[in-house]
Amino acid sequence: YKQNVIEVEVFPYGENRKLLLSHDITKLENTEAMRRDFVANVSHELKTPLTVLTGFLETVRDLPLSAEDRARYLELMHGQSMRMQHIVEDLLALAKLEGDSEAPPMDTVPMARVMLQLQHDAEALSGGRHIIEVTCVPGINVRGAEMELLSAFGNLVSNAIRYTPEGERVHLTLRREGDRAVFEVADTGLGIEAEHIPRLTERFYRVDRSRSRDTGGTGLGLAIVKHVVSRHQGEFEVRSEVGRGSQFIIRFPSERSLIESDGPPRAAA
Ligand code: ADP
């Protein structure tokens, strides 16, 4: 580790007696390096679509185009500006999560409602190209911030669909493990090599850059998931096998999982 050493003479102690102050600045330097990397990454991520967008714009401005070609270029330009918009939205979401060190206001969130919303989102995203299955044990509530949970789960669902070929399966599950609530997204898609798994939640880390971009990925989804899970004191697990598929699992802590009995309380006999 790196030391920043400052020697200070302390007079009352007399000759040859010095007070040595040492600070570990490794952490500070790492934080600074991470900040520099992050700024470089953000600039790069935005620069690519911006360059493409400018090229299309100049084509439309400078070349005589048929109405058809013009419409096609406008569509391509729209795609690039949407990509920039997604990156900026994800960056803002991440900045908000990181800047806000306090736990979010916790409500009792009925998970059946969340799962229904996710099912609709998954079906819309897939556009009928995947088999979407949902298994939801009724009566499970989680102490949490519903918007944050929806955003984390939504990122996992969107990944499962984007990294799973057409006709394959995406399965959303909500279940109990003891007194903990567990959310899982399993797909029968590409899978991820073991060496990549520990780095997936780093900002802008991707296994396959071009595929992630082609399918509208920002590289920030799993970083957002990690923050939301940690703000809920949950655990995040990724299991995957190349060519067979992946499972992304969120376990909530038992004291925050509120398991309620199904149906109305029974009348006393
Ligand atoms: P992205 O926007 O690139 O999808 P994420 O942070 O959501 O960014 O995911 C990081 C990387 O993890 C992705 O680029 C992809 O390589 C990999 N990944 C995430 N989910 C899956 C999945 N369900 N199947 C295969 N690979 C995945």
Image (cartoon, rainbow, N blue to C red):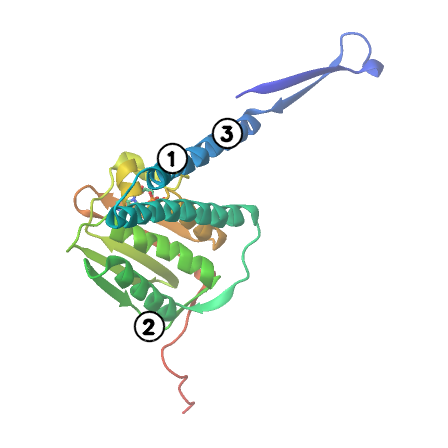
> Residue pushed farthest left?
167
For residue 125, side relative to residue 2 (left or right): left
N-term-proximal mark, 3 vs 2: 3
> Residue pushed farthest top?
15
| Quarter holding residue 60 | top left
Location of residue 140 with respect to 226 vertically, above or below: below
At mark 1, the secondary structure is: helix
Indicate the amino acid at tag 2.
Pro
Q: Quadrant of ligand 1?
A: top left
Whether residue 226 is visible here, answered yes or no, is: no
Location of residue 136 with respect to 64 vertically, above or below: below
- Structural crowding at the residue carrying mark 3, measured as other residues with C-alpha within 10 Å and reported as few (<14), some (14–19) or many (≥20): few
Residue 201: which disc? none
Which residue is label 2 attached to? 138
- Structural crowding at the residue carrying mark 1, measured as other residues with C-alpha within 10 Å and reported as few (<14), some (14–19) or many (≥20): few
Query: For the residues marked 3 and 2, what is the alpha-carbon distance in whole angstroms?
Result: 47 Å
Residue 51: which disc? 1
At mark 2, the secondary structure is: loop
Indicate the amino acid at tag 1.
Thr
